[in-house]
Amino acid sequence: MELETIKTQRLYVKVAEQISKLVQQGKLKPGDRLPSERELAEKIGVSRPTIREAMIALEIAGIIEIKTGSGIFVVEQKPELALSDEGVGPFEVLDTRYIIETEACALAAARITEEQLEELNLTIKEMEEEEKRPDASEQADMKFHMLIAEASQNSAISAIVKWLWELRNQSALSKAFMARLREEGIHPSINEHKRIVDALAKRNPEKARNAMKSHIEAASDAAATYFSSNK
């Protein structure tokens, strides 16, 4: 008796498959412009970040092209269109980081040591040097956020934050999208990281929480500008 493995698809893959089928059926033709991000989200019944992740997957598959400032268009197709689960989407990771890292930052404000503050400042200098290189890997950015998680003095939080960054770095979808953002000139904000350190140095949990919230919100907004013409 042969049994098939049951697979749970990520939501963005299901959305991408719907669009792919419309292309295969000829209901969407090369050159057609897709509806707006908001309209797609309302019609399909998913969030706008899910729509964005579906569009990234479709672009990786060569089914659509995202033209910043113009829209999202169907491109010429091969007879067979293949979609695969490319890992956790970048907007899902950002949503989860917003929940976890903001509170980790608040805890860190009350518990961080002078040595850890100094290490954060040194890491910002590493980020500044890294951003000067065309192949910047954002390793210093990851190190910065891991240091704050460790400063919370909660090993569970540290493990979760490390796992979230690993998810981002291991996801083909996220890696491809981050490369596209770099091509668009979108980079981690040094000033936002400095504001986080300033709040931590003042030992103010609320300011630290808000500084991290603003930082991750800004990162989400910056990532969304890739789809700016498709609001």
Image: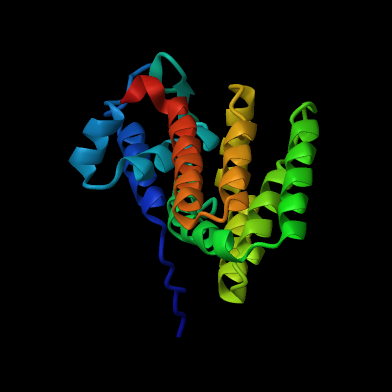
Rendered residue at 57%/39% (across/down): 195
Q: Residue at 21% x, 47% y: name it.
A: 45
Residue at 63%, 50% in the rendered image = 201
Q: Is residue 29 visible?
A: no
Q: Residue at x 50, y 59 (%)?
A: 106
Q: Is residue 56 left or right of residue 111?
A: left
Dividing the picture into quadrants, the one containing residue 128 is top right
In the rendered view, would you say 101 is above or below 6? above
| Res. 14 in view | yes
Q: Quadrant of the N terminus?
A: bottom left
Q: How many marks?
A: 0
Above or below 60: residue 108: below
Q: Residue furthest left?
A: 43
- Foreground of the two, 193 or 35: 193
**Residue at the farthest top position:** 70
Residue 89 in the image: above or below residue 67? below
Q: Quadrant of the C terminus?
A: top left
In this view, the residue in front, 188 or 93, is 188
Q: How is the image coloured?
A: rainbow
Whether residue 156 sits left or right of residue 140 in the image: it is: left
Residue 141 occupies which quadrant of the picture? top right
Is 133 placed left or right of 221 in the picture?
right
- In the rendered view, would you say 142 is above or below 79? below
For this rendering, which residue is in front, 88 or 118? 118
Residue at the bottom extreme of this rendering: 1
Q: Can you give x and y, in whole percent of width and height, for residue 131 in the image?
A: 74, 30
Toward the front, the furthest residue is 202
Residue 80 image offset from top left, x and y in percent: 47, 39
Q: Position of residue 166 (x, y in %)?
A: 64, 58
Q: Position of residue 132 (x, y in %)?
A: 78, 26
